[in-house]
Every structure is written in structure tokens, then in C-alpha cells.
Image: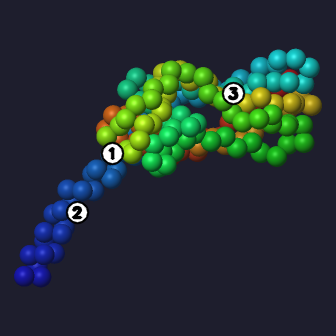
Amino acid sequence: MANINKGLFFILLSLLLPWGSFAQMIQDPTKWSFEAKKKSGNTYQLIFHLNLKAGWHIWSLHPGGDGYEISPSFTFANNTHLKLNGAVTEKGKATTTKMEGIDGKITYLNGKIDYIQEATITGKGKFLGTLNYQVCDDKMCLPPKDQNFVFEVK
């Protein structure tokens, strides 16, 4: 009997293993670029441009839902020449709807999206950081991903 259970366990395990590695085989459907746009004086907009492949979405900065949705986050490295003014805002095509398996209405964006951080910059140089995000399609979400970013002010 023990041999039958071990055999059944290994058969089930071999059937499930490919699914765990499937998400790792999918290429990241995001393309990020970064722009420092001078507004006036020392005031800049640091713009995170995101272009998502068709069929994929990213959660809004304020997704609603049941609290399990992973919103994009932006962390700047300490720099004495950089002062962040307010919170990051988002611009893009937002959809608010109910989604199967999620309590409450949720908001996500797809296509081309801009995340904008207003900042005061008092010197030239590179301003570094890391962004964290998760993207999903209608069947699954990819694991959250960290990506480094650089804004250059000349």
C-alpha cells in the first residue's frame, strides 16, 4: 500500500511541476522608460512611462478590491539634491469593475500608462531607485517584480 501511495504522489507531483515553472517562462509584458521633464525653476516631473502588451493589465495605485492586489510602488534612493513633492499619480486608461475571485470592485490600467512624481531637484546628476509592480492577464498574475530606474538631469 505504501508503494502505491508513493507512486501516486510522484505521478501527481510530475503533473503539477510544469505549472509552477510556466509563469517563469512567460516574458515580462512590460516596457518601462523614464523621463525627467523640467516644469519651471527647480521643479520637475519624474515620469515613469509604461507600455503594456495587449491583454495585460497593472493594478491601479488605488485598486480597491480585497487588499490582495499589488499596486506599483516607487522608492527613490536618498539624494540630497532630490525632494519629492506629494505622492505619485497615474495617467492612463483605467477600468473599474468586479472581477471573479476578488471581493469588491477593483481598478486596473492597461495599454500606455504614466506614473508621475513631482520633485524639486537642486543639482544635476542621476536619481536612482527601484519600482515594484505586478501585471496580470485574464487568467493569472505574474509574480511581483522589482526593477531599477534612473532619471538623469543635466
Crowdedness near tag 2: few (<14), some (14–19) or many (≥20) residues, C-alpha within 10 Å: few
Pick whichever, 123 or 58, lies toward us: 58
**What residue would you read off at disc 3?**
116
Quadrant of the rendered structure where residue 48 is?
Answer: top right
Camera-side residue of 90 and 45? 90
The residue that label 2 is drawn on is 13
Q: Is mark 2 on a helix, strand or loop?
A: helix
Task: Please name the residue shown 45% across and 26% down the image.
Answer: 95
Task: Single out the mark in the foreground, 3 or 1.
Answer: 1
Q: Which residue lies at the image location 42% right of the left edge and 37% below the top edge? A: 105
Residue 42 in the image: above or below residue 139: above
The three-letter code of the residue at mark 1 reads: Gly
Q: Contact (CB < 8 A) between labels 3 and 1?
A: no
Q: Can residue 87 be seen in this view?
A: yes
Label 2 and label 3: CA atoms lie apart by 45 Å
Helix, strand or loop at label 3? It is strand
Q: Residue 103: horizontal and vertical position, in percent?
A: 39, 45
- In the displayed structure, 4 sits above or below 16; it is below
Residue 154 on image: x %, y %:
86, 23
What separation in Å lies between label 3 and label 1 (alpha carbons)?
A: 31 Å
Which residue is labeled 1 in the image? 101
Image coloring type: rainbow
